[in-house]
């Protein structure tokens, strides 16, 4: 018992001590470190590419000074939206995974594993192929509709009288994903070749073509969804102890769970509608965040978001720089990194959840 | 009691035997239909003439011999192999979810062929089956190892999950290699979606004999699989050397899966669907399930390939897309039913 050192906390109190916040110091430090790393990686991402730009020049450009017209153009028009989109998509996928894991009490959940991403993909591909005239502004909504349908299907299929089990939930998702993907592929074969090619590069989870419009969509939705998620974080902490305990603590369990599922699906659908299915980020980030610094739900979600952003930014950078003229979609890099993590989590899952 | 049961056994045998000619007839019918339909529809009469008395000056006969017959033969061989492999796997592991594609064997074989082509250039046709077999065996071993380490052991569910993880990983690596060597892989691109279009009959000459041998071995071993499906102790008590039998069956399954991948690319869910359908008719005796699965699998893949060729006229759907479309719902149903 003597070895147990309680984690140090930073305590903030309002003047009359009405409201007080007790924040774990370690988590705050890590969050600061992650933010710094995010900034460094952003600058690095802006500097890397077929047109070489020195990090110093990037910094100057970002501060509004024009180093040269070419650099201005490359940084502002091509690399900056791409970098921002990567970071935002990463954060959204990570948060979606964290919320899914909490709402389904399943440590293996990830939007791309349970079919949510594939649902969005099918909805968007259907629209692109069958109704090519539809406007891009509708895309997030259509993606959301497709995702929520699949999420509901997986949820209702994996629940039986004995209650759901973690592995069965995932397997159900894998089966549904295979079915949905086959329909998507068939639609691609059916569609016009040039439209199919656009859809194909999008399906690999590539951030190549992100524009400022995409960044605006992503940022707008994050601005709506993130605060609503943080509002439910108190009920989420209670739900970590199980439904009975959470109900006893006065948390609105049913309402919170439905809200959470909607938010998780929303995050995944919007991110997918912009860059295509991006696997395993939602699986890795929450676990890594928990490992780096135990924290309350709110802070944990922020850490998860930052880690997800870092992960996808890094994957995009590696995919761009590792085999220089060829660009590897970020989705492939995250899958290569993510599967070993998935296997380790599977091996360490509790026996109670195993079958 | 014995007198009561004897007629039941006889009628079951009769029922099982009576299915064989029906299946053979169905296979022949879809085989001829497969050759007849296409961009230039040919009358069945011409098809039969081309097969029985080939006339090299007749243009239709040349189409049939050089283009359509190889594809139909490929569909028969691959369909029979994959569903027989699936049936054996389900019996040995007592796992209703077993299938060469779900447990990572097909992606392992595809991965090995891909990597060896990327590293050493296009391998000779004679080597491809061996490379594919090594890949299938390696992937199967890794999947089994992961599933063993999961708390609760190698249950059907943990095996399937491990298989899905390995397939996802290998799939991503294959895509990366593919992107890096686009020129080398122009011809492999179609192959990777799992289709039967434009197959080279030369490869069948190398792989075919091995697969025929494995199919035969599978049918011979089938009687002992029935005992194995009752559990290792029961099988041992009845005088079966379970270790040896399992090794033999593993060899058969690996040869069949790897050969199918070499011929047609990774086709999913065939080994899952057919044995389950066959079981509805012949019950749980593997002496019947295994040969039935081979025949029904061949007829199934030939029919699916007909649909793939004519569903959207000017173009073709990859055969693998349709097998997944049919197989995935059954998979969901099986997972759902398996409530423990």
Image (tube, coloured by chain):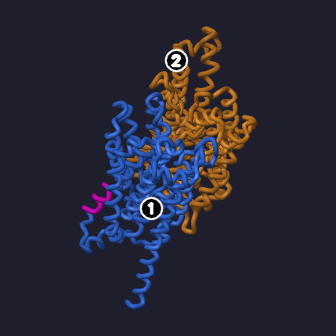
Chain colours: A orange, B blue
Give the chain of mark 2: A
Outermost residue toward the top in this view: A68
Determine the secondary structure under disc 1: helix
x then y, percent, for residue B94: 39, 65
Give the prevailing secondary structure in the magenta stretch: helix
Q: Which residue is mark 2?
A: A50
Q: Which residue is mark 1?
A: B295
Crowdedness near tag 1: few (<14), some (14–19) or many (≥20) residues, C-alpha within 10 Å: many
Camera-nearest residue between A224 and B334: B334
In the rendered structure, the answer to whether residue B253 lies left or right of residue B293 reads left
| Residue A325 visible in rendering | yes
x then y, percent, for residue A203: 58, 38
> Are both tags, 1 and 2, on one chain?
no
Q: Residue at x 34, y 66 (%)?
A: B222
The count of marks equals: 2
Q: Which residues are magenta?
A: B244-251
Q: Does residue A347 show up magenta in the picture?
A: no
Residue A157 lies, with reference to residue A180, above or below; the image says: below
- Cα gap from disc 1 to disc 2, whole angstroms: 56 Å
Q: Quadrant of the N terminus of chain B?
A: bottom left
């Amino acid at each position: 018992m003597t070895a147990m050192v309680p984690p140090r906390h930073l305590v903030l109190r309002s003047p009359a001590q009405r409201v007080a916040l007790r924040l774990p110091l370690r988590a705050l430090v890590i969050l600061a470190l992650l933010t710094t790393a995010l900034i460094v990686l952003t600058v690095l991402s802006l500097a890397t590419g077929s047109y070489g730009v020195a990090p110093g020049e990037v910094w100057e450009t970002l501060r509004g000074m024009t180093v040269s017209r070419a650099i201005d153009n490359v940084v502002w028009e091509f690399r900056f939206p791409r970098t921002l989109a990567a970071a935002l998509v990463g954060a959204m996928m990570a948060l979606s995974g964290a919320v899914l894991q909490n709402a389904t009490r399943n440590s293996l959940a990830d939007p791309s594993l349970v079919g949510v991403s594939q649902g969005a993909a099918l909805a968007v591909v259907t629209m692109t192929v069958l109704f090519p005239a539809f406007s891009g502004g509708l895309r997030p909504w259509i993606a959301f509709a497709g995702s929520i349908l699949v999420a509901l299907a997986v949820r209702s299929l994996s629940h039986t009288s004995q209650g759901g089990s973690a592995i069965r939930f995932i397997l159900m998702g894998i089966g549904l994903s295979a079915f949905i993907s086959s329909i998507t592929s068939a639609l691609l074969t059916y569609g016009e070749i040039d439209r199919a090619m656009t859809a194909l590069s999008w399906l690999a989870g590539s951030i190549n073509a992100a524009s400022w419009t995409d960044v605006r969509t992503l940022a707008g939705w994050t601005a709506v969804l993130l605060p609503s998620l943080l509002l439910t974080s108190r009920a989420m902490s209670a739900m970590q102890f199980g439904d009975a305990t959470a109900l006893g603590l006065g948390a609105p369990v049913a309402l919170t769970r439905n809200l959470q599922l909607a938010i998780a699906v929303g995050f995944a659908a919007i991110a997918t509608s912009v860059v295509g299915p991006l696997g395993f980020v939602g699986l890795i980030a929450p676990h890594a965040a928990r490992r780096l610094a135990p924290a309350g739900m709110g802070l944990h979600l922020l850490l998860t978001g930052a880690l997800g952003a870092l992960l996808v930014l890094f994957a995009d950078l590696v995919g761009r720089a590792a085999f220089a003229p060829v660009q590897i979609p970020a989705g492939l890099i995250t899958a290569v990194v993510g599967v070993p993590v998935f296997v380790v989590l599977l091996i360490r899952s509790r026996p109670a959840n195993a079958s | 009691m014995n007198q009561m049961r004897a007629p039941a056994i006889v009628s079951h045998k009769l029922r099982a035997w009576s299915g064989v000619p029906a299946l053979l007839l169905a296979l022949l019918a879809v085989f001829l239909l497969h050759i007849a339909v296409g961009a230039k529809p040919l009358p069945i009469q011409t098809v039969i003439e081309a097969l029985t008395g080939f006339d090299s000056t007749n243009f239709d006969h040349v189409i049939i011999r050089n283009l359509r017959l190889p594809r139909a033969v490929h569909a028969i061989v691959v369909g029979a192999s994959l569903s027989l492999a699936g049936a054996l796997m389900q019996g040995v592991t007592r796992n209703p979810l077993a299938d060469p594609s779900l447990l990572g064997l097909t992606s392992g074989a595809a991965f090995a062929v891909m990597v060896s082509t990327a590293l050493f250039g296009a391998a000779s046709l004679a080597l491809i089956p061996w490379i594919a077999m090594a890949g299938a065996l390696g992937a199967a071993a890794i999947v089994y190892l992961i599933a063993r380490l999961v708390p609760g052991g190698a249950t059907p569910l943990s095996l399937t999950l491990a298989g899905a993880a390995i397939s996802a990983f290998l799939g991503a690596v294959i895509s990366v290699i593919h992107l890096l060597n686009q020129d080398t892989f122009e011809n492999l691109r179609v192959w990777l979606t799992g289709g039967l279009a434009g197959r080279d009959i030369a490869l069948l000459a190398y792989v075919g004999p091995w697969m025929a041998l494995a199919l035969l071995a599978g049918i011979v071993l089938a009687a002992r699989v029935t005992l194995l499906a009752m559990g290792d102790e029961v099988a041992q008590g009845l005088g079966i050397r379970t270790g040896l039998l399992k090794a033999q069956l593993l060899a058969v399954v690996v040869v069949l899966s790897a050969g199918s991948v070499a011929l047609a690319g990774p086709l999913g869910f065939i080994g899952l669907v057919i044995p389950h359908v066959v079981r509805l008719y012949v019950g749980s005796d593997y002496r019947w399930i295994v040969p039935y699965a081979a025949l029904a699998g061949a007829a199934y893949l030939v029919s699916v390939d007909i649909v793939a060729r004519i569903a959207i006229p000017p173009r073709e759907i990859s055969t693998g897309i349709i097998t997944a479309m049919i197989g995935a719902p059954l998979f969901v149903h099986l997972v759902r039913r398996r409530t423990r």
